[in-house]
Image (tube, rainbow, N blue to C red):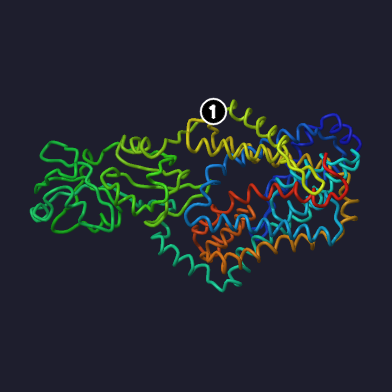
Amino acid sequence: MQWAHDFFQAHSDLAVYLALGLGFIIGSFKFKGFGLGGSTGSLIAGLLIGGFLDVPVSATAKSVVFLLFLFGIGYEVGPKFAKAMKGDGWRFAVLGVFMPVVGLLTAWAVAKYLGLDPGFSGGLVSGSLTESPAMGMASEAINGLKIAAEQKEKLVGHVAVADALCYVFGAFGVIWMCGTLGPKLLRIDPKEEARKLEEEYGIKQGAAKLSGWRAVDLRAFRLTDKGARAWRKVSDLEASEPSVRLFILRLRRGGEVIEAEPGTELRAGDVIALSGPRATLVDQHGEELAEVDDRDLLDQPVSLVDVFITSKDLDGHTLEELARRDHDTLRGVYLRKITRAGQDIPIGPRTVVERGDVLRLVGPDGVPEKLAQRFGSIVRDTDTTEFRVLGMAIVIGAVLGIVAGVDWAGFHLSLGSSVGVLLAGIAVGWLQSRRPMFGRIPDGAVHFMQTLGLAGFVAMVGLGAGPHFIPAIREAGIGLFFGGMVVTLMPQIAGLYFGKYVLKSNPLLLLGAMSGAQTFTPGLAAVQERSGSPIAVLGYSGSVAVAHVLIPMWGSVIVYLMAGGATPA
């Protein structure tokens, strides 16, 4: 192994990429749906490589990628952070505060009981609460302590070891609690709860699946004499099915094609282009309407656009309310998809639209574009990142985080550069949601920042901690693993009963919110799998934005709490 040691000593940057590649291979393996994921896999790979090869790691490189990751996280949750406390979502936002606080207090108690040093304590928090960014915060706090450099290096290594040891059950515990134990403790049938909740929201299962079937269609019908007597104007026919949205987009009268308006007169023999739910159109065959094939009439250009919602006119209203209120404005326009905080939201009449949502609209050419100007702005594919905003926001956030601080119990507690950058990302993301042309960063770029930033950081932490891995395991013992189990489960159990009896949350949405409060998307996937419905995402999206801010900061807080006489610099 000497040649490998010499090679990676000279080319330590390649060791980072090796850890990334092997880490994502490790993270891709799953057992009964459970996998570690790329970030934890990169940490484990880094620990193994560092343990065998003792690779030097640049502190500057670690900081660069970690700050990039934090900004990306803040940028993504920013649009929803302030919104989380509004409407019915306040319950899940409160849960997103309650569970992390319980997790911190439990971790502090366990660390005190086991006599853990600040490094092990930081890793206990990040691994047990499945929030790897807390590991970076803990490392930054340790580097700020007034202790010897060798001791700092050892404690930072302990953070990585404890995170890797505790994360395994941390991930499994959230999946098990949200998907299996939680429903039993709540005494619910997830599938039945999902059915009732979907019925409440007016959601029909299967409508969002990709198939040859189309939810909305455009078909041609000839108006008979009886039909002309029943419906004298376009608006009469469109109102004939009150529970659905029907629109006549245009009609053929003789050899002329006429654009239809609500007041347009209908005559026997007119051929109309009727749009609406496919199931409704299929039932239109009868004495009033006879379906015909009229390619020229149906060959109407359509637009499909993604609209970023910023208008207060839509915020907090259900789709049913908007369809009724803006009937004429929304003529011929249909909703295909709603995305909120990166998650697809189930669509039903009582689904609530929020500022920051992205709505995919389809309708006659030009109409969705006009609606976008009224409701927000069109989200267009772009490969351009606003690096001026990105760079300056990271610098300003880091500086403010370093400068801002308070004296407490003999400690000088500062936010630190990491928390400052996270808050800067939230601020830029929130501003961008209000002024879409400000600080635009493509979704793909944000995802790349998050994935490479976190995986690269933990891989480098693992490389640096590798030489300390075996001694640290011997020092921590099995107690750290079982202590991590307690830290994982306590906030989950407390959150379940707090959400049920205090917040009075819907049980299925509560389970989704619990996974969000521990920022662990696979926990949400477990709830959705057990319930056979995606609707639990409504609870997840309300808690995850708040928890993504709090839990990373616990890495710094637990270090300060456990530092004893090692006063922060």
Q: Is residue 115 positioned above or below 45 on the image?
A: below
Q: Secondary structure at mark 1?
A: loop
| Of 123 and 92, the residue lying toward us | 92
| Of 52 and 562, the residue lying toward us | 562
Question: Mark 1: which amino acid?
Answer: Thr
* Image x and y of residue 538, in percent: 50, 56
Can residue 19 be seen by looking at this rendering?
yes
Quadrant location of the C terminus in the rendered image = top right
Residue 164 in the figure: left or right of residue 174 = right
What residue is drawn where x is 80% and y is 34%?
59
> Hey, which quadrant is residue 133 in on the image?
top right
| Residue bearing mark 1 | 384
* Image x and y of residue 237, in percent: 18, 52
* Image x and y of residue 342, in percent: 53, 46
What residue is drawn where x is 15% and y is 49%?
222
> Hey, which quadrant is residue 384 in on the image?
top right
Can residue 25 be seen by looking at this rendering?
no
What residue is drawn where x is 63% and y is 58%?
98
Determine crowd level at label 1: few under 14, some 14-19, many 20+ residues with C-alpha closer than 10 A. few
- Which residue reaches farthest top? 388
What residue is drawn where x is 70% and y is 35%?
65
